């Protein structure tokens, strides 16, 4: 099952007929979809269905896995095929940031975690870095909690705070797209609610694609949802439609808990 791919200027990511393999194992089968600018798209489906593989295709993180490759099809971001020779993967990953399942702050201070990316980009002026750090921490709804602790270790933060710090670190380099791979799976309900509120706030400035096993989370934060099963995209539609009136029986069986 594929979705029509648009070349509209409102399209942030366009995937057309993509197959992806790990060695001889075909992990994605003829995936076609488009993600619009400043929307939140959720990928749902059972473990091993290909949703995280597709997410990692968008910033070419899979390039780091031996034998992993796109075997056919195209992935365009803002109309540019991301596997073209002129595309620098490092620059791509600046434009397409990623927040991982487990918070992974650097063994540095809170300030240096956020300033790390801008420093790599060549920014060294202290006042400019101070402004970037504050803006990113405000953007991740963390500033008020850490503004008096910026020179303390990031490991002193709670799990939920660490995850929001990782989001601040991601947005500090001003990406256009933010990928989130189960960002709340290790968090308690209170921390999860804070991160979900943050995701909704970030939508004003960023295109967001989130992989989640929590179907309630998908209903709370996403505009559209794609359901994956065994490497195929079974259905992609408005989130309300996927959860209340899906077209495919497999989708209904999954969202109602009959399997998965």
Image (cartoon, rainbow, N blue to C red):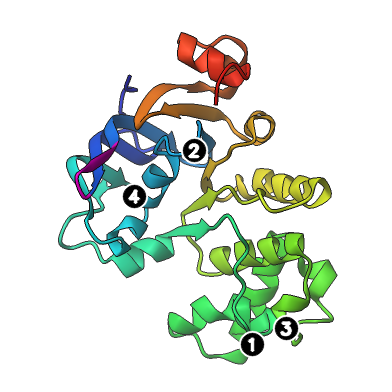
Give the residue pinned by disc 1. Answer: 127
Magenta highlight range: 23-27
Q: Nearer the viewer, mark 4 or mark 1?
A: 4
Give the residue pinned by disc 4. Answer: 57
Image location (x, y in percent) of residue 247 = 47, 9
Residue at x-position 55% and y-position 58%: 99
Give the residue pinned by disc 3. Answer: 153
Secondary structure beneath dot 1 equals helix
Q: Measure how far apart labels 3 and 4 are at the Cα level.
A: 32 Å
Front residue (pair 89, 191): 191
Secondary structure beneath dot 4 equals helix
Mark 4 residue crowding within 10 angstroms, few (<14) / some (14–19) / many (20+)? some
Of label 4 and label 2, which has the lower sequence position?
2
Residue 130: quadrant of the picture: bottom right
Image location (x, y in percent) of residue 100 = 54, 57
Residue at x-position 58% and y-position 47%: 182
Q: Nearer the viewer, mark 1 or mark 2?
A: 2
Q: Nearer the viewer, mark 4 or mark 2?
A: 2
């Amino acid at each position: 099952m594929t979705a029509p791919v648009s070349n509209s200027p409102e399209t942030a990511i366009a995937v057309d007929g993509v197959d992806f393999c790990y060695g001889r194992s075909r992990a994605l089968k003829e995936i076609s979809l488009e993600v619009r600018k400043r929307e939140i798209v959720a990928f749902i489906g059972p473990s091993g269905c290909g949703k995280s593989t597709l997410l990692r295709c968008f910033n070419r993180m899979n390039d780091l896995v031996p034998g992993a490759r796109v075997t056919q099809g195209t992935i365009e971001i803002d109309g540019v095929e991301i596997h073209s020779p002129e595309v620098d993967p490092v620059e791509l990953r600046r434009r397409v940031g990623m927040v991982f399942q487990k918070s992974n702050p650097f063994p540095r201070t809170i300030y240096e975690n956020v300033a790390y990316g801008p420093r790599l980009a060549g920014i060294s002026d202290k006042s400019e870095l101070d402004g970037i750090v504050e803006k990113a921490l405000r953007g991740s709804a963390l500033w008020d909690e850490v503004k008096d602790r910026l020179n303390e270790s990031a490991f002193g933060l709670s799990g939920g705070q660490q995850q929001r710090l990782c989001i601040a670190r991601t947005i500090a380099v001003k990406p256009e797209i933010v990928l989130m791979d189960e960002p709340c799976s290790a968090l308690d309900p209170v921390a999860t609610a804070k991160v979900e509120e943050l995701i909704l706030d970030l939508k004003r400035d960023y295109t967001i694609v989130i992989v989640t096993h929590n179907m309630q989370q998908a209903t709370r934060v996403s505009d559209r949802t794609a359901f994956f099963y065994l490497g195929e995209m079974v259905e992609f539609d408005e989130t309300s439609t996927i959860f209340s009136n899906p077209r495919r029986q497999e989708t209904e069986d999954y969202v109602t808990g009959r399997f998965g």
